Image: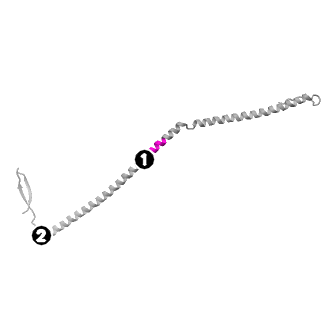
Amino acid sequence: MLFSVPVDKGTDPETYELIQRIQLMQKRILGLAAACEERNEQLNEAKKLNEALQKMMEQLPGPDAAVQIYESQVALREQERKTKALEAELTMYETKASEYKFNLERANEELHYVRKTVIEKKKSERIKKERQRKSPNASQSAPLPSKKTHFMGGGFNTTVALKS
């Protein structure tokens, strides 16, 4: 609020200068008050921002989290090492399993071949025997075994095929 008194310049020059100084001082005071008010608003805004930043800082992980992260990384590396070892072992076992399967298939093929050969031999021997039975010379050259009852000690009856 400006101080205003109706004073004439010509009647009292000292009073007039004093009034002008007072008015100038009042204008300065008003300007400084406005600047002070503006700074107070800036200060309040800075306080609010500081509080928000402090809340954010509280939510950020501290040095304990860094230790936990480091320990987790060490554990992860150990698990990766174990996993790689297990994968290598699995690959080795898969290789052995495929080798065993190959050997099993080969053995089955050999068994199949041997069975086929044995069956063919038996078949050829049977055919040979049938030819010998049908041919007249074959029956004279090889007599068939005859069955004869034979008693052993203790009176047990056993039938034994004897060649004549």
- Residue occupied by mark 1: 83
User: Is 152 drawn above or below residue 10 in the view shown?
Assistant: below
The part of the chain drawn in magenta is 72-84
The quadrant of the rendering that contains the C terminus is: bottom left
Q: Nearer the viewer, residue 148 or 5?
A: 5
What secondary structure prevails in the magenta region? Answer: helix
Q: Residue 90 at what x, y percent from top left?
A: 38, 50
Q: Is residue 25 left or right of residue 149?
A: right
Q: Amino acid at mark 2?
A: Ala
Q: Residue furthest bottom?
A: 136
Let me know if residue 83 is in the magenta part.
yes
Identify which amino acid the numbered label 1 is placed on.
Thr
Position of residue 151 relative to residue 57, above or below, is below
The residue identified by callout 2 is 138
Query: What is the quadrant of residue 5 in the picture?
Result: top right
Closer mark to the observer between disc 2 and disc 1: 1
- The answer to whether residue 54 is magenta is no
Residue 109 percent across, percent down from the top left: 29, 61
